[in-house]
Image: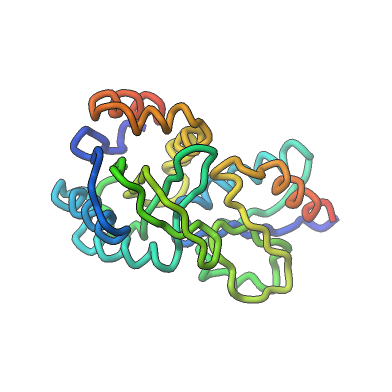
Amino acid sequence: MKKKQVLVACGAGIATSTIVNKAIEEICKENNIECDIVQIKITEVGSYVDTADLLVSTTIVQKEYPFPVINARAFLTGIGLDEVKKKILEQLKR
Amino acid sequence: MCEIYFDESLILKDIDVNSREELLRTMATNLFRKGLVKKSFIEAVIEREKTFATGLPTNSVSVAIPHTDSEHVNKKAISVAVLKEPVNFGVMGEMNVEIPVQIVFMLAIDKKDSHLVLLQKLMEIFRNAEELQFLIEENKTNIKKRLANHLQI
């Protein structure tokens, strides 16, 4: 299976995406999935349209992209976290 | 993680403000006066909150983590405000949804990865109703001790 590219985005690309980045790394590790995680500002998503398989974002995503978008706020608040982890895992295993 | 500046002067307790902007300005100006951020941080953090809301609902008191680009930061720092009455913040990642926020953690941070532990510890606090209640009820000295200990700063 081709290694998936996962974009992790937030407004500044330095704060909340750092948390989510680490969390996704752990999900991959636990499930023996290799993926390429790229931590970016939401404004930089455009540069990855051709390569990305998934966008996980803590901020609003207004544009349409050819890959699924998952809201990552649960990683910060813990509310609904299991469900979001499951959704991400489903995408990574596809 | 001792390179993150945090002391009692960065804790604003029972602060009485009428709006989110007034709160952000008060907190950011305080950081600026201490030389921890550049003057541009003040407007930058206010503007950024409009585009990228940072309000986070919790199982207890809602919180917010306003921050902005690293170019406005001189020295990594964290400031905490506990509000007398909540003010509305937009919810992170949601369009046009606001929540009343009572505890605000303003982050002056620089490049990625350097503050992972701090952020992870902060999120642990958000998931702990007892910790949040402690911040509401206690005085600055106790808040400083508890947070410094919990955040390992």
Query: Which of these two is toward me, B2 or B64?
Result: B64
Between A8 and A38, the one lying in front of the other is A8
Q: Give the image quarter of residue B39.
A: bottom left
Residue at point 26%, 57% (across, down)? B18
Q: Nearer the viewer, residue A5 or B122?
A: B122
Residue B25 quadrant:
bottom left
Residue A80 in picture, x, y percent from top left:
66, 44
Q: Quadrant of the C terminus of chain B?
A: top left
Res. B77 in view: no
Residue in front for this viewpoint, A67 or A51: A67
Quarter of the N terminus of chain B within the rendering = top left
Question: Vertically, is B103 above or below B39?
Answer: above
* Residue B61 in the image, given as x and y percentages of width and height: 45, 40
Tally the marks: 0
Against B146, residue B87 (above or below) is below
Residue B150, image x, y percentages: 41, 26
Residue displayed at 78% across by 53% down: A92
Q: Residue at x 36, y 48 (%)?
A: B86
Residue B5, given in percent of the width and then of the height, sits at 26, 38
